[in-house]
Image (tube, grey):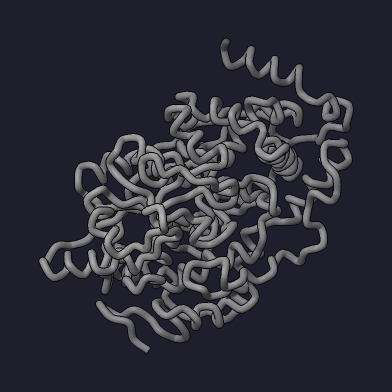
Amino acid sequence: MNKTLALALAASTALTAPALAEMLDVEKDELTFGFIKLTDMAPLAVAYEKGYFEDEGLFVTLEAQANWKVLLDGVIGGQLDGAHMLAGQPLAATIGFGTEAHIITPFSMDLNGNGITVSNEIWALMKEHVEHDAEGKPVHPIPASALKPVVDAFADEGKPFNMGMVFPVSTHNYELRYWLAAGGIKPGYYSPEDVTGQIDAEVLLSVTPPPQMPATMEAGTIYGYCVGEPWNQQAVFKGIGVPVITDYELWKNNPEKVFGISAAFQEENPQTTIAVTKALIRAAMWLDENDNANRPEAVEILSRSEYVGADYDVIANSMTGTFEYEKGDKREVPDFNVFFRYNATYPYYSDAIWYLTQMRRWGQIAEAKPDSWYDEVAKSVYKPEIYLAAAESLIDDGLATADMFDFDTDGYKAPTPAEDIIDGIAYDGRTPNAYLDSLPIGLKGDQKVVGNEVQG
């Protein structure tokens, strides 16, 4: 069946409520959105395949992008009207780290969804430092303190310890750094003069595009990586590596990707932006409804070559509520991928501020900033007012109810309790500098990176 016919059938069998509701007067109805081949692009694929974009009068083309930089450049240059983005990208672009441009987000795409995988060689060395249960299975979560003796042994032999992440401002970079630092391993700093992020590093982190992670590790170029699915489970299926921790275990229900657009696009197309957000919210609802009952269908969609293009079984391994660590060690992780529940789609300021604190922690933000600066940047990039306008329109259409959305929030989540984070340190987005001061490794106060050392 060709894509046009499939879309027509999906639209004809969709709920009739949108057709009966008053459609938004969109300014632009032909749109092109970019994505990277990861399972968390699912809201875009579902909104397309289920006809939710068409219900809003939108005719959308989805285009896979080669890497995150190409994707961001496409949004900035206007070749793409919007994209599945790393949450750090709109923030970094807006404050001028890397490419400078005002990018905003009205929609958070998901919670959780990442893992940290090491090669078989490294896992064999780590295992003797990992606690095991009565059945001989590793006790999760596995802390990076189990990796530290391995890293130290490599250093004693004069061998660099290399790991991969997907982009300098990716969740994966910050999660890998967080895990390493929580285990007493220094992941290195950035400075305005040295943007490798490897200043004073015990583990050297470098960029590898997500689909290339398993092959790069198999070749021995890196010893492990942090990436989204399906590229951790791919290592298990290929028999080349072992995922040691998921980001759900690192920080329970942490924010992940966002849908990014330029501020200029939103200013020129305010009704279109609301319409797009409506379609994406509907897709997220569909992905999580009835205890993930639609996930097998979602996996089939994502396994197609135009989307993620990995085997059905590889994607299903995490997308349907389980996660496989070692071969045969499959465990229930029902919230590994969350798309709607727990207010996953709401663009919270506190989520934005966590990313900004990690940029400051590792030197991507070179100078100390007051708490008020973090609040101002978050509010310039994360746009809950657009999200709530879309939610209200869905309620008016009869497709959602008010209790599905967080209408009462001021944009800040309640603090994340210490027991939900790997290092036992609570996070409160309202007090970013106090949070930074509480982290044992990383810049705090007026400290800055000068040459190869931290001063202050």
Name the quarter where the N terminus is drawn.
top right
Q: Horizontal placement of 62 versus 117: left or right?
A: right
Q: Residue 372 appears at what percent x and percent y? A: 63, 78
> Compared to 145, does 46 lie above or below?
above
- Who's the residue at 62% across and 59% down the image? 381
Q: Position of residue 135 (x, y in %)?
A: 40, 52
Comparing 224 with 388, the one in front is: 224
Residue at x 65% of width, y 38% of height = 292
Residue 216 vertical position relative to residue 20 in the rendered view, above or below: below
Q: Position of residue 317 (x, y in %)?
A: 48, 37
Q: Residue at x 32, y 65 (%)?
A: 146
Name the quarter where the C terminus is drawn: bottom left
Q: Is residue 319 left or right of residue 271?
A: left
Q: Nearer the viewer, residue 19 or 346?
A: 346
Give the residue displayed 86% in from the left and 36% down from the top. 397
Is there any visible trace of residue 275 in the rendered image?
A: yes
- x then y, percent, for residue 441: 39, 77
Q: Residue furthest top?
A: 1
- Along the horizontal axis of the image, is 10 left or right of 435? right
